[in-house]
Amino acid sequence: MVPSFACIITDLQMPGMSGLELKQHLVARQFAMPVIMITAHYEPGLEERALASGAVYFLRKPFDGDTLIGCIERALKT
């Protein structure tokens, strides 16, 4: 199955599956689209774990729309 999208934006804290778990599932299924992870929670090492999982960007809430748009634009160029 070929995805019909070019980038994933996911929160790290979701019911049922975390953003890190989602990224693991994508890797296991060989989906290589860029992933931007966002969170409102602070936890030591969280950003490092998100980026090590393959996320191209990590944003802490609150962030402005221009920041997100910039991340999306850069992610789509990779």
Image: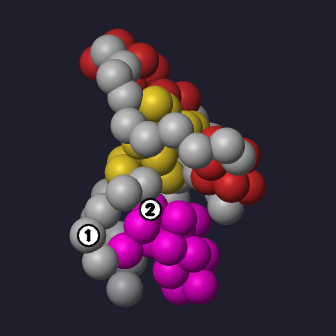
Q: Is residue 23 above or below residue 29?
A: above
Q: Nearer the viewer, residue 5 or 19?
A: 19
Three-letter code, disc 1: Pro
**56 left or right, relative to 23:** right
Q: Residues within 10 Å of mark 1 (few under 14, many from 20)?
A: few
Q: Residues within 10 Å of mark 2 (few under 14, many from 20)?
A: many
Q: Quadrant of residue 64?
A: top left
Q: Which mark is residue 15?
A: 1
Q: Quadrant of the N terminus?
A: bottom left
Q: Residue at x 53, y 52 (%)?
A: 34
Looking at the image, is mark 1 or mark 2 nearer the viewer? 1
Residue 54: x and y in percent read 66, 57
Gap between marks 1 and 2 measured at Cα: 10 Å
**20 left or right, relative to 2:** right
Residue 24 visible in this rendered orientation of the protein: yes
Q: Which residues are magenta?
A: 17-32
Residue 43: x and y in percent read 58, 44
Secondary structure beneath disc 1? loop
Q: Residue at x 36, y 51 (%)?
A: 11
Circle 2 residue: 19
Secondary structure beneath disc 2? helix
Q: Is residue 63 above or below residue 9?
A: above
Q: Is residue 31 above or below residue 6?
A: below
Residue 69 visible in this rendered orientation of the protein: no
